[in-house]
Image (spheres, rainbow, N blue to C red):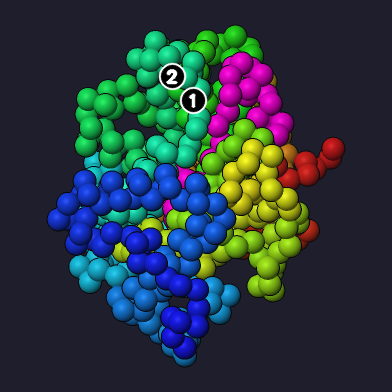
Amino acid sequence: MTAANDVHIDNKFLLPSLSAYRRSPIRAWLRIARDTIRGPHEGHKGIQARQEARLRDLVNYARAHSAYYRDHYAGLPEYPHLEEIPPVTKPALIARFDEWVTDDRVKLSDVEAFIADVERVGMPFADQYAVWTTSGTTGKRGIFLHDPVAMSVYTMLLLVRAHALTPGGVLRALGKHLRIAAVVATGGHFAGVSMVSMVQHRFPRLARGVRTFSIMTPLPHLVEDLNAFNPAILAGYPTAIEVLAEEANQGRLRIRPTLIVVGAEVLTPRARSKIEHTFNTRVFNQYAASEFLHGIAFDCGQGWLHVNSDWLILEPIQADGTPTPPGQPSDTVLLTNLANRVQPIIRYDLGDSITTHPDPCACGSPFPAIQVEGRHNDTLRFPNASGHSIAILPLALGTVIEKTPGVQRFQAYQTQDNELMIRLETRSDADPDAVWQHVHQRVQWFFTENGIRSVHVQRASEPPQRDLHSQKYRTVWVARLKGR
Ligand SMILES: [Zn+2]
């Protein structure tokens, strides 16, 4: 098969090469910026042409530079169609990490040593790659590297397409010196905190007003710190912002942000209306993942997320691998990251459930509109010594468990007011009982820090598994409470 059999491939749509970027980052930036601005003006056809050119280029690159993909694609035609390309999973890629990456100098042992050092959060690995691990909502740890060209694409998408602030909003935000509070998981190389830290290292003047706040901080202290900082923009996980909205309703949190940005978890319509109503401002939602960072899809203000499908491909599929029709929730979704070469992500099982808008969106965007249902975790509530209900964020609890050495995969679910069950899968080189003891100790410590003393933390006899009814993989949730 030759290129002539397929769609005409236009080289002008291809990414600047990594060497071209090194020679002139400014020129590479301008090229990416121009294309990201122009793409949507060329409509569906222009977006499709970019997607096809970039996919073909990425598949060629992966075959030439990644031993994993060379094996995986053995027997495929030279120019395969998207649906012919075999999907990949996170466990399979992580198991052959050194062969997956396209830079011979990147070794898993070195990356693990790098991410074990919390002092190096936000610093480049091997002088050029952004690196982060997943935080506690995915259940299984991944390690992701992004090259400078990919980072430029993510940044450009945010600058060009995330129309979050209105002109009036910009003025009000400037009135608060553009102070941005990011409520994120800290204590590890997670995407959110790494991004903030990276910006702070590179642009110290610009980032003076940006501060991270840990979701691990007990709520009363977090509220106090946010009151003192008085941010113009509040960013974080929907579950964390929803709990903060409750604090504002109770009169304890007194900030008046101009804009609230959420991502990385599902934003339910109920949570959105509660947050918007409480803070009397707009919530900007984005679909983000460690595999593509911010900008898989952006909120359009009509309740839909638009996929940046010139820089990535999202394919909603059924459990048997066939495409999910528009209007129906998928079993999972395959992601292809068209911007990143160091660690190619091509038809990668992301595990989320999405629904595609069956019709063009009312906002007029040429990008496909989706809603995300997957990976929905619950905020847990436990009584403290005086009987008050204390909210425990799923991501905070998940991070405590996932950061315990030896943990491979976990699930935690609340079965009673004072009982938490944990399903644990440990790494093959770890002693399961010792890992459990450590998890138990850390979770108890975390509850004590939050003023909760009487929760029975129990190890479930069964391993982590998908929900029997929905087939979704959740990590932290409230099970049907016994005796209710
Ligand atoms: Zn729209």
User: Would residue 272 be found to the left or right of residue 166 on screen?
Assistant: right
Is residue 8 depicted above or below 196 in this figure?
below
Residue in view at x 50 percent, y 30 percent: 164
Does residue 376 appear left or right of residue 263 in this picture? Answer: right
Q: Residue at x 45, y 82 (%)?
A: 4
For label 2, the residue is 170
Quadrant into which the C terminus falls: top right
* Contact between labelled residues 2 and 1, with CB atoms less than 8 Å apart: yes
Q: Is residue 209 left or right of residue 255?
A: left
| Residue 282 falls inside the magenta stretch | yes
The residues colored magenta run 268-296
| Image coordinates for residue 53, horizontal then vertical, percent | 43, 67
Q: Nearer the viewer, residue 349 or 171?
A: 171
Nearer-the-camera pick, 414 or 283: 283
Residue at the image position 47 percent from the left and 30 percent from the top: 235
Q: Front-most of 468 and 208?
A: 208
Instruction: Classify residue 173 by image quadrant.
Output: top left
1 or 2: tag closer to the N-terminus: 1
Question: Compared with residue 178, is residue 1 higher up or lower down, i.e. above or below?
Answer: below
Q: Residues within 10 Å of mark 1 (few under 14, many from 20)?
A: some
Q: Nearer the viewer, residue 411 or 214?
A: 214
Q: Position of residue 321 (x, y in %)?
A: 65, 72
